[in-house]
Image: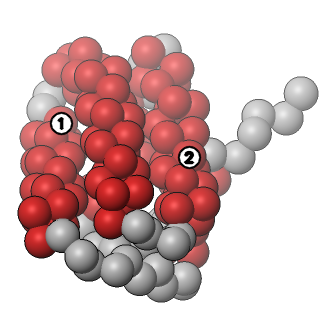
Amino acid sequence: MTFHKVAMSSPAACMALHRGRKKLRARVTTLLATPDTGFAQGFPGMVAAVEAGFRHEEALLELLGDACMPPRRADHAIILSALHRTASRVESGDLRQGRQVVDALRHVLALPWPFIGPASLPRHTAAAARPIPR
């Protein structure tokens, strides 16, 4: 696991990072508790919320002068790739796969921040992010 350190120069920005992660975790947890019909309908909105949350996180990290932005963006890209790849499966009725990826995301978002790196992703999330063979 790679540990990234942030120069914590702005307490307000750090609190905003924490609140953003907490809000995303709550949204993901709520989606997991939703019955199948609601899960399928709520999945695209959750993906959009994660995208917006990551954009906000990256803006705050730039404000803080985070020297590890490329690895962080790569981490976000892996997660978003898994979510987008899974979205088409959820649309076609594979809710089991969708729930597995969302549950993995819940665990990733619960990791102590900012200690997040590619090696911390659960195996089935990383597998979902692999390119589809042609």
Give the image location of residue 59, x and y in percent.
35, 48
How far apart, in angstroms, are the residues tagged by discs 2 and 1? 21 Å
How crowded pointer 1 is (Cα within 10 Å; few <14, some 14-19, many 20+) is rated as many
Q: Could you say which is closer to the camera, residue 81 or residue 94? A: 81
Identify whether 58 is placed above or below 11: above
Specify whether 13 is left or right of 66. Answer: left
What residue is shown at x 40% (from left), y 57% (from top)?
62
Q: Amino acid at mark 2?
A: Ala
Q: Quadrant of the N terminus?
A: bottom right
Mark 2 Cα-neighbour bin, 10 Å: few <14, some 14–19, many ≥20: some
Q: Position of residue 64 (x, y in %)?
A: 32, 66
Mark 2 vs mark 1: give the one in front.
2
Q: What residue appears at the point 49 percent right and 40 percent down from the top-left corner?
A: 80
Q: From this viewpoint, is residue 2 visible?
A: yes
Q: Are marks 2 and 1 in contact (CB under 8 Å)?
A: no
Residue hosting label 2: 77
Of 85 and 90, which appears nearest the observer? Answer: 85
Q: Is residue 107 visible?
A: no
Could you say where residue 73 lies in the image, as x and y percent from the top left? Answer: 54, 53
Where 54 falls versus 22 (above or below)? above
User: Which residue is at the front of the view, 7 or 128?
Assistant: 7
* Picture layout, residue 92 above or below residue 55: above
Residue 95, x across and y down, in percent: 37, 30
SS state under label 2: helix
The residue positioned 52% from the left and 20% from the top of the image is 88
82 w.r.t. 92: above or below: below
Residue 79 image label: none
Q: Earlier in the sequence, mark 2 or mark 1?
A: 1
- Please, what is the three-letter code of the amino acid marked with disc 1? Leu
Image quadrant for the C terminus?
top right
Q: Which residue is mark 1?
A: 31
Rendered image quadrant of residue 19: bottom left
